[in-house]
Amino acid sequence: MVFQTLELINEFIWGHISFVLILGLGIYLSIASRFMQVRQLGKIFSIFFSFFQAKTAKTGIHPLKVFFAAIGGCIGIGNVVGIVTAVQLGGPGALFWSWIGGLSGMLIQYSEAYLGMKYRVRNSAGSYDGGPMYFLPHAFKVKWVAPLICVLLCIYGVEIFMFNVMADSISVNWHINPYLVVALLMIAIFVVASGGINRVGEVCSALIPIFILLYITMALWVIFQHATELPALLRSIFQAAFTPQAAQGGFAGSTVGLTISMGLSRGAYSGDIGVGYTSVIYAESATDKLQRQASMTIIGIFLDTFVICSLSILVVLATGTWHTDLDVALMVQESLALYFPYMHIFMPTFLFLLGYTTILAYFVVGAKCAKFISPKWGPTIYYLYACFALPIFAFFNATQAFVVMSLSGAALLILNLTGIFLLRKEVSFRLTDS
């Protein structure tokens, strides 16, 4: 009953308030920047490759390590499992609204990262501290907004949904005691997260690229097998984005409002749009070229929404698994298993790596926020909360864990997007050549 109520609240917030904020601010920033996310995409990728030649500075973290640490949080289980729930509940049209959210989210996240770096401060560890707790007080002109945003980021930083999916996938597919899986995962998280964003960036840059390329290749192969069906499939996506959908198979049907809500909320969740997490990580970049570093968020959203999320949804739509009674965590796995062997080994491994890097990135951000609230007691209380929440929610239904994350993300989004709008004139969209 409690989670049903939370789900209704979540649907209302994402279907009405967050919907207006994401689209409204996204359209405004797109017009203000002359659609930089589309017009300058080629130059942004050029900037990305130029960072491979950047030298390590004395203060801050290498720009590429920062990018991969942020990508570690952005590209995760939400791209494979979380985004599929959008279709399971909202129908095929949810993919269209996740695209709209992605286009808006590119500039929202750019602005968020830019402001996080603009208002950052040096710390005693030889790096920087920044993020919404530093720029939101300038927007709202009140001091209480900083600790509030930090508390919400601490809740968001303990990623109970992805931890739930990881633990379930590993224990079910590999037949390992779930209690042992939970214990080992927690140890793995705490050990690496203690090294901060620099260590997380090293781990993410080593683990993510290879498995993402494998996943993209397999997904494209499955879609290629259904190439003749793609035109009709794409038409159904656009039609379903604006019309109610009738029940079919395991799909219960949906209204247009639910389709919009699912597409935007799952898309925003998978891409961390407006949450503030990205700006905390980007603030530690060693570069002083704020626009160039902030533009990397556009690549992140592009990979997240328009590549991995889209492929995940197209795979389950093309193979028809989206309207079966399969658990959402197994839909992509079963779709790929129709064409590739050993998916019961590959997918748990893939979900583990994606979930692990995401949880690490979130966890480090939460720890920084806890330290901001109380340098002495904040980190200890934060770790105790993680020790309680992770194992408890590992045995809840994945949808229930997602609702908690989605609600905390919605609260963060409302505060951050309002703050970004108030500081909109301080954001520069001019990409320098050096």
Image (cartoon, helix red, strand yellow):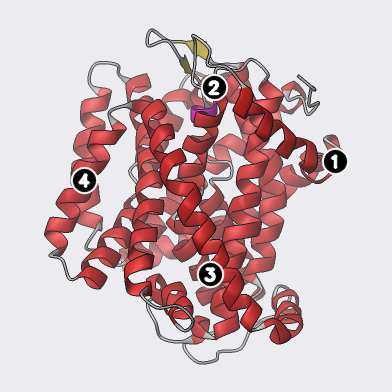
The image quadrant that residue 377 belongs to is top left
Mark 2 lies on residue: 285
Residue at image position (38%, 7%) is 124
Mark 3 lies on residue: 218
Mark 1 lies on residue: 31
* N-term-proximal mark, 4 vs 3: 4
Residue at image position (64%, 66%) is 260
Is residue 282 on the magenta stretch? yes
Q: Name the residue nearer the viewer: 410 or 171.
A: 171
Residue at image position (38%, 73%) is 343
Under mark 2, the amino acid is Ser
Q: Name the residue nearer the viewer: 177 or 131.
A: 177
Please, what is the dominant secondary structure of the magenta stretch? helix
Q: Is residue 261 visible?
A: no
- Percent coordinates x, y for residue 46 in the rendering: 74, 35
Mark 4 lies on residue: 186
The answer to whether the residue labelled 2 contacts the one labelled 4, judged by CB atoms less than 8 Å apart, is: no
Q: Label 4 vs label 3: CA separation?
A: 30 Å
| Disc assigned to residue 166 | none
Secondary structure of the residue carrying tag 2 is loop
